[in-house]
Amino acid sequence: NSEEEEEEEDEVGNGNQITGQQHHKQPSDIQQHSMRNAVTLRVRNWVPYMYKEALVFFPGYNSSMEYVLKSFGQFLAMTRVSRHVYPFVYVWPSSYNLGYLYASKISASDINEENVLKMVTGLMDAGITKVNFMTHSMGVQTLLSALRDRHNEKGEFIGRSDVSMCFQMAQDFEESTENEERKHGQNSNQIVCKSITLLNPDFPVKAFCKRGFLSLRRICQTITVVGDRNDRALWWSSLINGVAAPLLGVEFTEVLKPTIIVDPEHEDMGRTLMERIGRSIDKLYLENEMGQEYHQSGNDKAFRRLLFNKAPIDLEKAASDDEGKNRFWMDMDVIDMTGLDTNIKGMRHSGFGLNPMLLRDLGELLSSGGKRAIKRSGLLYREGNVFSYAHAPSFVSQ
């Protein structure tokens, strides 16, 4: 009896000791069951939001995980993104210093595409129904590589990528060659791509105009390019890819090539600047040859859906225009931030997380459900598909 009394006194007087004794006891069936399952948090009488939305950010070259999380976190803190939007960062091995060409190869690699597919399927399994993509600089190469269309040896479209097939096709996108694809295009298991925003994108103009834009437009109606005509980082990128890469014998991945079909007579692309869409923002239009192909095949309506503001122009006349008076401007919003100077200095390449005008506009874009530039406040229409901010530069005075 005295021993039992001593044990009871120990249990009452020493809470730590009793905790330690219970830790070494054989776990019950209920405890074993709970240990086999992941720990979850349940809130009584809490009704979860039915529609889950994600914002996936693809950082650019020379961006460590710590730097990306800090800069993107600052961006989220300074914008009014809905609390129902779950932010994600896809951090890929972006290299640094002199590894630019190597990083470009990695960004558009098959392994990177497989990892993007795993991420998207993971979002789908978690109940995400809508996704917003945002890229900065070289991050656009990762996204476009994952969403790139499949072509045969003749350059003809044969299907979408595995990542692209995770998304529903844009409601207004039509093309007669995609009957089989449209049959599976509205699967209830597929998710919706609400918006795609490309910040200072480091991607060749020709490859984007010929193939890249179409791969994005198939799944999204709200595509935005934010560029700067004085972006110095993209000027160096144009020089490295157009001059240094050919001298070093670097072969570009398929998504970055101007054309899929290699013409032996024009195989040498020359040593000139390879313009990037984030700097050459006034050259984002479809080529006349594409307009002629659609017109000759009787698909004027399908082609017009790809044009900015569904421009009611004479396709036959515009396609034969060699003077550039009638451009086939792509159906997307191009935001010219050249006139902004607050918190944008030096290379003028990474101001999206600092400039108040840009932060306010991007926040409105993400929180409005993909509102086009023509309906957003603070933007002025210029020409083609280009807008600029209603803001006077600092050097303007009375």
Image (cartoon, grey):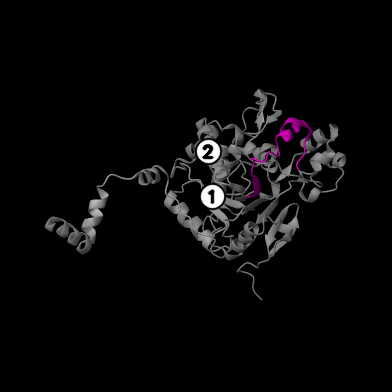
Residue 195 falls inside the magenta stretch: yes
Residue 275, horizontal then vertical, whole percent:
62, 43
Q: Give the residue displayed 23% in from the left and 53% down from the top.
A: 20
Nearest the camera: 244 or 196? 196
Nearest the camera: 207 or 126? 126
Up-down relation of residue 343 to residue 334 (above or below): below
Q: Which residues are magenta?
A: 173-196
Residue 233, horizontal then vertical, whole percent:
54, 50
Q: Amino acid at mark 1?
A: Ala
Q: Which mark is residue 233?
A: 1
Res. 264 in view: yes
Count of picture labels: 2
Res. 320 in view: no
Nearest the camera: 372 or 211? 372
Q: For the residues labelled 2 and 1, say whether their Cβ atoms are less than 8 Å apart.
A: no
Residue 386, horizontal then vertical, whole percent:
71, 54
Farthest residue, direction front: 1
Q: Give the residue displayed 48% in from the left and 55% down from the top.
A: 42
Q: In the visual, does 350 lie left or right of 261?
A: left
Quadrant in the picture for residue 5:
bottom left
Question: Which quarter of the rendered picture does the N terminus lie within?
Answer: bottom left
Q: Give the residue displayed 52% in from the left and 62% down from the top.
A: 77
Label 2: element kind: helix
Quadrant in the picture for residue 295:
top right
Up-down relation of residue 180 to residue 78 (above or below): above
Q: In the visual, does 176 lie left or right of 95?
A: right
| Residue that carries the numbered disc 2 in the rendered image | 118
